[in-house]
Image (spheres, helix red, strand yellow):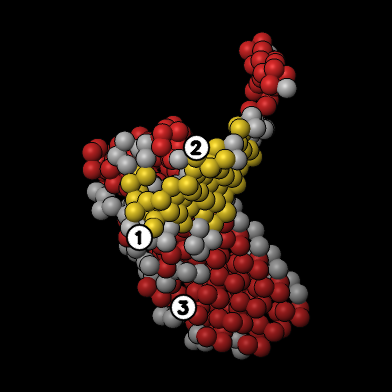
Amino acid sequence: MKNRIDLLKLYFLFLCLTCPLFCGEVLAQSNSSIAMSKNSTRWNSDNGNQKSNLETSGKITISDDEKSISSISPGGYLKIERTTFGNSRKLFITNKNGTLDYEYNEGGRTKPFEPDGKIWLSEILPELLNTTTIGAEGRVDRLYAKGGTKAVLDLLSKLKSDHVKSGYISILLEKKLSNPDMVAVIDAVPSYLDSDHYKYEVYKKIPASYFQNVDQLSRVVSNLDSDHFRAQLLKPIYKADVLNGQGEKALQLLNLLDSDHFKADIAKSIPFDKMSDQDLRFVVDDVIRKFDSDHFKNDLLKSIVNAGNFTEARALIVLSGVKSMQSDHFKSEILRYVCGKQGTARVKEQIRKTAKTTIQSSHFLGEVMRCAA
């Protein structure tokens, strides 16, 4: 039986050596998953030849040489299971009364941790560090102490997934980084991360105040493909009003999005009452005008009306937004809305003029004329 197994192994090796396409196809058939709960994290992977399961709980600290476990927080544990070509090994490390306790199993049989278990752990730990986030905090601390931000960013090329890379970058961002270091981190994100989800997970940890630099913010927004994540990033920045005073340059960021829904969602977070009349005109005449949907145009114009500081001059600016609408229904609605909020003689005169020159329906025209009489 043993001879037969050895022959099968030799045959597989022969196929890999003589037919790279076969070997590549087998190795490509790899599945991995991550499951996180309040108390533990699990990593599972299977490439057809090797199955690995890793489960952690608590804070795990890795030795400086990255070949052993230095400590595990009370109640925590590290569980490693790996099966390669039918050969299985298991290691369970726990904190018992302040010391590490090792349970090692090989081929279904319990064995002393030393020497075989210790050697096995030292061999696989470097790989586990690059495919999971175990010991990531201590690893970042060591690298940062030796070589600063650059040393941590240089490690990213060795890490194997966006999940792990974003975890390391997020830990790095907890340091008090200088402006040049922050720029280096932001520049590294699109180079190492493919997923918008994980890019955003990193970007959202950057303080909104940093994005007072509109050019830097524009680069970050452009690094995201999804309007959803662009909106998630921009909303708190506009809401915090950190772009105040940068006028059209800051507002142009809204035009980087394609979706009217997300544009309006972001724009409604802008404190319009603090905006200058000039910037407000840019919002109405440039940003809102480029919306395709009259529904969202109407929705955002109402937000401007309701923001406060709605003077006669600002009412006239809002009325200019009606010219870009197609629907008589929405034209009538916003004209009557402005009429109810700012009904000076000059505003009413402009409402009547706008209605007569833009509304075709006698029904909707009549509604507006009655309001502005």
Mark 2 or 1: the one toward you: 1
Sequence-wise, the earlier of marks 1 and 3 is: 1
SS at circle 1: loop
Q: Image point 60% across, 40% down: which residue? A: 108
Residue 183, numbered label: none
Residue 97, numbered label: 1
Left or right side of 307 for 260: right
Left or right side of 247 for 322: right
Q: Image point 68% across, 25% down: which residue? A: 25
Vertical relation: 47 (above or below) 180: above
In the rendered image, residue 51, in percent from the top left (x then y), is placed at 61, 38
Marks 2 and 3 sit apart, C-alpha to C-alpha, by: 47 Å
**Quarter of the image that includes the C terminus:** bottom right
Q: Which residue is mark 3?
A: 307
SS at circle 2: loop
- Amino acid type at circle 3 is Ala
Vertical relation: 166 (above or below) 288: above
Task: Locate residue 112: give its quadrant.
Answer: top left
Q: Image point 55% across, 70% down: which residue? A: 300
Q: Which residue is mark 2?
A: 160
In the rendered image, residue 303, in percent from the top left (x then y), is placed at 52, 75
In the rendered image, residue 71, in percent from the top left (x then y), is placed at 34, 51
Do we see residue 202 in this rendering? no
